[in-house]
Structure formats: structure tokens, C-alpha cells
């Protein structure tokens, strides 16, 4: 399953694309995901597994949420949160329903 093409984060609408994210000098994998707040884009490395891509997308969305809220986007804080949040959401489908009710 492909990620959504557009995701609203606060007042911003981020475009999500899949691409090879390679280091130009070495040609090796540079990153699994990149968020560019000024361009409102999230790029995900297309060669990763579906589970890793979900984790990467949530990780990048946390960066976007920090930007939208003005909170610091500390990589050391964001990295461990994404996997934990994926688990919380996956293990508690009623929670997702509750959180997304109007």
C-alpha cells in the first residue's frame, strides 16, 4: 500500500513522494526519509519495506508537526517516538477511532 500523496499538518499540506534517496558522492543510501518544511514535501526512500516506510513516514510527520507547532525538531527525541507511536496506533484501533472522531 502506498502512502497518501498529500497530508495536512496543521496549516500546511505536505506532498509525499517516493524516490531513491542516495548520497550524490557515494551513490549509497543517504536516508529513509527527508522532510523539507519550506517546500512542504516529505520524500520517502522507495526501496524500504512497508513496515519501515510507515515508521519513516510517521517520523517525518513528527518533524513536520514540530515545524507547524513551533516546537524544536530534536532528532534524538523524534527517532524513538515514531516506532512507539506506530505500535500504539496499531495495537489500539479503538483509540484511532476515538482520536479521529469529529
Image (cartoon, rainbow, N blue to C red):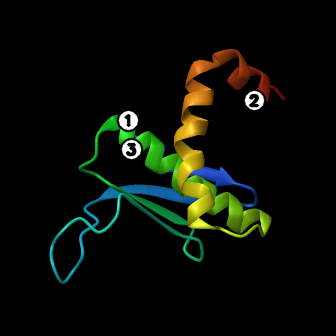
| Residue 85 tag number | none
Which residue is at the far top? 94
Q: Is residue 50 left or right of residue 73?
A: left
Task: Give the label on residue 51, or none.
Answer: 1
What residue occupies the far bottom of the structure in this picture? 25
Residue lying at 76% horizontally and 67% vertically, measured from the top left: 71
Q: Which residue is mark 2?
A: 100
Residue 87 x, y percent position in the rendering:
55, 30
Q: Secondary structure at mark 1?
A: helix
Is any part of residue 25 visible from this angle? Answer: yes
Residue under label 3: 53
**Residue 66 found in image quarter:** bottom right
Residue 16 located left or right of residue 50: right
- Identify the residue at horizontal 51%, vertical 58% (top origin): 15
The answer to whether the residue labelled 3 contacts the one labelled 1, judged by CB atoms less than 8 Å apart, is yes
Could you tell me which secondary element the residue under label 3 belongs to?
A: helix
Amino acid at each position: 500500500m502506498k502512502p497518501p500523496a498529500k497530508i495536512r499538518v496543521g496549516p500546511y499540506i505536505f506532498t509525499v513522494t517516493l524516490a531513491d534517496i542516495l548520497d550524490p558522492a557515494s551513490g549509497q543510501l543517504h536516508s529513509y526519509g527527508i522532510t523539507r518544511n519550506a517546500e512542504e514535501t516529505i520524500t520517502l526512500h522507495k526501496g524500504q519495506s512497508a513496515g519501515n516506510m510507515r515508521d519513516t513516514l510517521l517520523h517525518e510527520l513528527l518533524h513536520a508537526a514540530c515545524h507547524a507547532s513551533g516546537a524544536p525538531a530534536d532528532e534524538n527525541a523524534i527517532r524513538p517516538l515514531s516506532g512507539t507511536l506506530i505500535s500504539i496506533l496499531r495495537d489500539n484501533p479503538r483509540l484511532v477511532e476515538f482520536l479521529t472522531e469529529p
